[in-house]
Amino acid sequence: MIEKKKNMLQTYDPYFRQVHYAISDNTKKQLLEIATAPDAFVDISYKISFFKLPSTIQHFNTTGLNCVCQMLRVAETDSKIHKDRNRYNEYENIYMPRSAVINFPLMPTKSKTMFYDDDKTFICSVGYSNCGAILNTGQKYHNVEYLDTLPRIVFQLCFERYSKKK
């Protein structure tokens, strides 16, 4: 059984890698308070909402890594299959790298990130059961399988590119 898990991570490595959950309960609570403020998010065409003011959460990046903090919110089904693109936040004009993200759920969720090949045929999925995941969102097609009644809110560390350990 353990071998299968190892092989699964190697097989799906171009798409994602699960990582140890590294956000404290206190940090999750603080981020959720910010996320539940009125008008905290702006909707985009993928049926995934972006946090409007990423500069206000940048201090939560205590990793020492060069990245931009972001939160996403999903509250409806059938998000569009897409590849992320680097962009500028329209409220603060902050550059938002989106090629790779480390996703940390802020609450328990049954929702998953689904990955697809270039023909948009399903390949694999990753859930967020008390752990985070490094997602290769800039080069791989993906969407969110939303399965909950409460919104799915994740905190992200956003990077310019995805790189694998050698």
Image: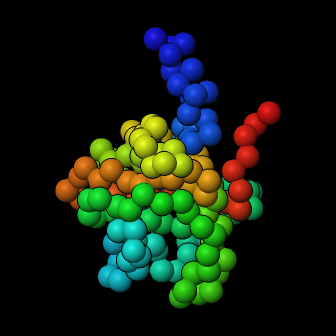
Residue closest to the far front: 119
Identify which residue is drawn at 26% across, 63% down: 76
Q: Residue at 61% x, 27% y: name it.
A: 10
Q: Position of residue 78 (x, y in %)?
A: 29, 59
In the image, residue 104 sits, relative to residue 21, either above or below, namely below
How many marks the image carries: the answer is 0
Identity of the residue drawn at 25% across and 49% down: 147
Quick one: 151 or 90, which is closer to the camera?
Answer: 90
Quadrant (top left, top right, bottom left, bottom right) of the C terminus: top right
Considering every residue shown, the one lying at the far left of the view is 149
Q: Position of residue 164 (x, y in %)?
A: 73, 40
Q: Is residue 30 visible?
A: no
Residue at 30 percent of width and 44 percent of height: 110
Q: How is the image coloured?
A: rainbow
Res 90 seen here = yes
Above/below status of 69 relative to 110: below
Q: Residue furthest right?
A: 166
**102 in relation to 47, above or below:** above
* Left or right: residue 161 compared with residue 51: right
Taking the image as shown, residue 127 lies to the left or right of residue 163, namely left
Please tell me which residue lies in front, 106 or 10.
Answer: 10
**Where in the figure is residue 86, as x and y percent of width and height?**
63, 70
- Percent x, y of residue 113: 42, 48
